[in-house]
Amino acid sequence: MTLKALPRPTTADKCRTFRALHESGCFVIPNPWNIGSARYLEGLGFKALATTSSGYAHSQGLPDGAHTCAEVLAHFRDIAAATDLPVNADFENGYADDLVQLAENVARCVTTGVAGLSIEDATGDDAHPLYDFDTAVARVKVARKAIDQTGSKVLLTARTEGFIRGRPDLDETVRRLKAFADAGADCLYSPGIKTPEQIEATVDAVDPKPVNFLNSGAFGFTVKGLAALGVRRISVGGTFARVAMNAFIKSAREIAEAGTFGSFADVISNAELNAFFDDAAGPKPT
């Protein structure tokens, strides 16, 4: 007897699902850094996933931002293909300063099977960490047009990075988010804000468009509390990957420095992981 697998959702299905998630309520979009973590998060019942540039880079022994555009596009394709959930791509600054190249890269990103992508206003230049206002807005417009020209319904998130790039100016953040919303962004995001007042200011600025909040530390927030502040989407960035790396580092240091193996206590078993991933692979012939 052969069991027939249920048809997997298409990219168009995932795009529709992803857009619907942003229409009301509040959901957590956790950030896997590889196929295994993506499939485990799907198994826990999360409704969507997002890639993490830092988590992926560190897992490959690189600093955040060191990958090429081609490498991250391949990563997006792998993650999107590994899960039935919608995936949002952390596409940083689109891997281009030039607007023509930005449009080309965004179009290439759409073909990876993601249901959403984010474009940020960080330049990668420590001396001038943010694109000037007009350039930042123009880049969102270019990304919007590039997506629309593909005929897809990929959701565009626009990020302003001031609070994590040494320019923590709430007024400028709000100004940029408003302009990005007017330029066609579907979702707005200002990583690094941490207080209820900052969150409410950004939510109010772009209402009724949804806002993503980055909960990358123990800030005391809950999903319910963030929903009450008007947040529609909660991501964790590279934090899950850092949690995993942190546990690995502590365990390795214990062995290297103390010669003991106490950190191995209560670790999930190989059999449990085998069973989970065997089930996640789908029905088997009997």
Image: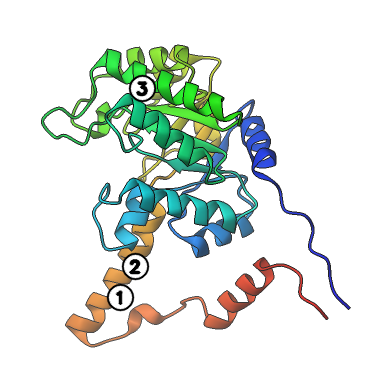
Residue 106 falls left or right of residue 101: right
Q: Residues within 10 Å of mark 3 (few under 14, many from 20)?
A: many
Residue 151 falls left or right of residue 66: right
Which of the 4 image quarters holds residue 167? top left
Q: Residues within 10 Å of mark 1 (few under 14, many from 20)?
A: some
Name the residue type under label 1: Ser
Q: Which residue is mark 1?
A: 251
Alpha carbon distance from label 2 to label 3: 39 Å
Label 3: which secondary element? helix
Q: Position of residue 185 (x, y in %)?
A: 48, 21
> Residue shown at 83%/81% (left/top)?
286
Which of the 4 image quarters holds residue 178? top left
Q: Nearer the viewer, mark 2 or mark 3?
A: 3
> Residue shown at 72%/53% (left/top)?
8
Q: Position of residue 256 (x, y in %)?
A: 20, 82
Q: Position of residue 225 (x, y in %)?
A: 51, 32
> Residue shown at 61%/71% (left/top)?
277
Name the residue type under label 2: Ala
Name the residue type under label 3: Arg
Q: Which residue is mark 3?
A: 139
Mark 2 near mark 1, Cβ–Cβ under 8 Å?
yes
Relative depth, front residue between 73 and 41: 73
Alpha carbon distance from label 3 to label 1: 44 Å
Q: Position of residue 151 (x, y in %)?
A: 61, 28
Counting residues from the start of the chain, the first of labels 3 and 1 encountered is 3
Counting residues from the start of the chain, the first of labels 2 and 3 encountered is 3
Q: Which residue is mark 2?
A: 247
Label 2: which secondary element? helix
Q: Nearer the viewer, mark 3 or mark 1?
A: 3
Relative depth, front residue between 56 and 276: 56
